Amino acid sequence: MQPIVSSTALGLEGRLTVYNYNGGPCYQCLFPTPPPMTACQRCPDSGVLGVVPGIIGCLQALEAIKIASAVGEPLSGRMLLFDALSAWIRIICFMGRSSQCEVCGENAAFTGKQFQDFDYEKFTQSPLSTGYGAGAGAGAGANSGGGGGGVACSSVVMGVEG
Ligand SMILES: [Zn+2]
C-alpha cells in the first residue's frame, strides 16, 4: 500500500494524518467501524471557514513533500489537530498497525476488487453529498471510497508513490 496523506476540515477545526507509511496504521486500523450517524456533520450543513482547509491543505502538502523526499518525520501513527479559534495545534499519538485489521492485518483478505466495489454509503449509512467540491474525497483511502467526501467532513486524500 502506498502512503496516504489525509486531512479533514469542518467548521473551525482541521485534522491531518498519514496512513500506510512504513508499516504504520491504515485508516481501517484506526476506524474499523463508522461513527454513528448522529456523530457525523457535513460541511454543506455545518459550514467550514475557508482558511481552515487552506492551513490544513498547506500542512498536507508539506507531509506529501516530506514523504516524497524521505526527510523528516511524517505524521504516521500521529494526528495533528488544529483549532482555529484558539490557534491551538496538538498532535496525538495512536496505536500502530492492528494485526486484526481487515485491510492490512495478518489475515487480511481485502483485495483491490473489494476496494473498487466498496459501498461507502452502505458502510456509513449516509448518502454521499452531490454537487459538492470536486477536489473532495479524491483519493485512494478507505475513507473516501472515491466518492464525494460529503460524509463527516470534507476530506482530501493525497496518495504519494513510494
Ligand atoms: Zn490496517
Image (cartoon, rainbow, N blue to C red):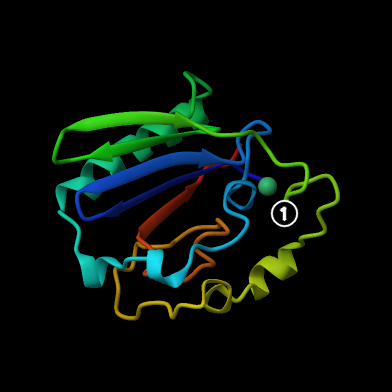
| Residue 44 to residue 159: above or below | below
Residue 118 vs residue 129: left or right? right
Classify residue 135 by image quadrant. Answer: bottom left
Could you tell me which secondary element the residue under label 1 belongs to? loop
Q: Residue at position x 52%, y 59% from top? A: 143
Foreground pick, 34 / 18? 34
Residue 151 appears in the rendering: no
| Residue 32 to residue 113: above or below | above
Residue 140 vs residue 138: left or right? right
Q: Does the residue labelled 1 lie within 8 Å of ligand 1?
A: yes
Q: What's the amino acid at mark 1?
A: Val
| Residue 128 to residue 143: above or below | below
Q: Residue at position x 72%, y 54% from top? A: 103
Spot occupied by residue 77 in the image (x, y as percentages of width and height): 55, 33
The local crowd at label 1, few if under 14, some if 14 to 19, many if 20 or more residues have their Cα within 10 Å, is many
- Number of labels in the image equals 1
- Residue furthest out toward the top: 72
Q: Residue at position x 71%, y 42% from top? A: 98
Classify residue 136 by image quadrant. Answer: bottom left
Q: Residue at position x 49%, y 28% from top? A: 74
Q: Which residue lies under the disc numbered 1?
A: 103
Residue 159 appears in the rendering: yes
Spot occupied by residue 3 in the image (x, y as percentages of width and height): 58, 41
Q: In which quarter of the image is the C terminus?
A: top right
Spot occupied by residue 127 in the image (x, y as percentages of width and height): 44, 81
